[in-house]
């Protein structure tokens, strides 16, 4: 009788242990799924230039790293939202080509085209990116590899634009001196004047 009672208690203990393991696994899996959802929201916010939505996804600061150029910049949340306002001037279209979570980070293949990229690069830029999180907030975005980016064409077209603006609309000079909304608007005006030249 004592053996059966101990056996039942052991079974209950084992069952409780399995349930706890299952609960922890589900919680862990749910957290992994959550970061994938957060990353998808991040790209949607970039695509729609939704500065309030993107602000809610970021930590107090976010590091943006260009691995191929060994360049890194740390933005406050406010500064990143200001950058988004600059980006929005050119009416960007971001497209997620691939996305997956892996070991607590999200890896994605992204395509971007906008009025600036169309003039300078003549086709969408495509890159691989890794997003890192801290307390379910984005704190690091690493552009790990450009898959489609012709830097020679980009720089050649940018030089042509700058030279033409210098000769024809010098009042717009300096639009490359920062990534603020007013400078973005001057950049867009320069592009429009340049595209309509004849």
Image (cartoon, rainbow, N blue to C red):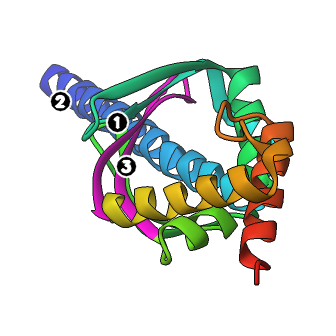
Q: Earlier in the sequence, mark 1 or mark 3?
A: 1
Residue that carries the numbered disc 2 in the rendered image: 7
Residue lying furthest bottom: 198
For residue 172, what is the image quadrant?
top right
Q: Quadrant of the N terminus?
A: top left
Q: Earlier in the sequence, mark 2 or mark 1?
A: 2
For residue 151, what is the image quadrant?
bottom left
The reply to whether the magenta stretch includes residue 12 is no
Place of residue 3 in the rendered image (x, y in percent of width and height, measured from the top left) = 13, 24
For residue 83, what is the image quadrant?
top right
Circle 3 — which element? strand
- Closer to us: mark 2 or mark 1? 1
Residue that carries the numbered disc 1 in the rendered image: 104
Which residue is drawn at the image coordinates 42% and 56% (left, top)? 155
Which residue is drawn at the image coordinates 31% and 31% (left, top)? 12
- The magenta stretch spans which residues? 125-148
Residue that carries the numbered disc 3 in the rendered image: 129
Label 1: few (<14), some (14–19) or many (≥20) C-alpha neighbours in 10 Å: some
The reply to whether the magenta stretch includes residue 145 is yes
- Comparing 153 with 63, the one in front is 153
Place of residue 18 in the rendered image (x, y in percent of width and height, measured from the top left) = 28, 37
Q: Is residue 103 visible?
A: yes
Q: Earlier in the sequence, mark 2 or mark 3?
A: 2
Label 2 and label 3: CA atoms lie apart by 53 Å
Label 3: few (<14), some (14–19) or many (≥20) C-alpha neighbours in 10 Å: many
Q: Is residue 133 left or right of residue 127?
A: right
């Amino acid at each position: 009788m004592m053996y059966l009672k101990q056996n039942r208690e052991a079974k209950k203990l084992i069952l409780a242990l399995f349930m706890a393991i299952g609960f922890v696994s589900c919680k862990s899996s749910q957290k992994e799924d959550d970061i994938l959802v957060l990353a998808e929201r991040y790209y949607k916010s970039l695509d729609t230039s939704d500065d309030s939505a993107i602000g809610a996804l970021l930590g107090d600061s976010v590091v943006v790293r260009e691995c191929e150029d060994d360049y890194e910049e740390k933005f406050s949340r406010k500064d990143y939202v200001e950058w988004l306002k600059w980006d929005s001037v050119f009416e960007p279209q971001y497209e997620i080509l691939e996305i997956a979570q892996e070991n607590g980070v999200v890896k994605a293949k992204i395509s971007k085209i906008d009025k600036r990229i169309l003039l300078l690069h003549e086709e969408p830029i495509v890159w691989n990116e890794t997003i890192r999180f801290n307390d379910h907030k984005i704190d690091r975005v690493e552009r790990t590899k450009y898959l489609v980016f012709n830097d020679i064409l980009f720089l050649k077209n940018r030089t042509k634009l700058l030279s033409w603006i210098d000769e024809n609309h010098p009042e717009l000079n300096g639009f490359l001196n920062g990534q603020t909304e007013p400078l973005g608007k001057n950049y867009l005006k320069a592009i429009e004047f340049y595209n309509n030249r004849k």
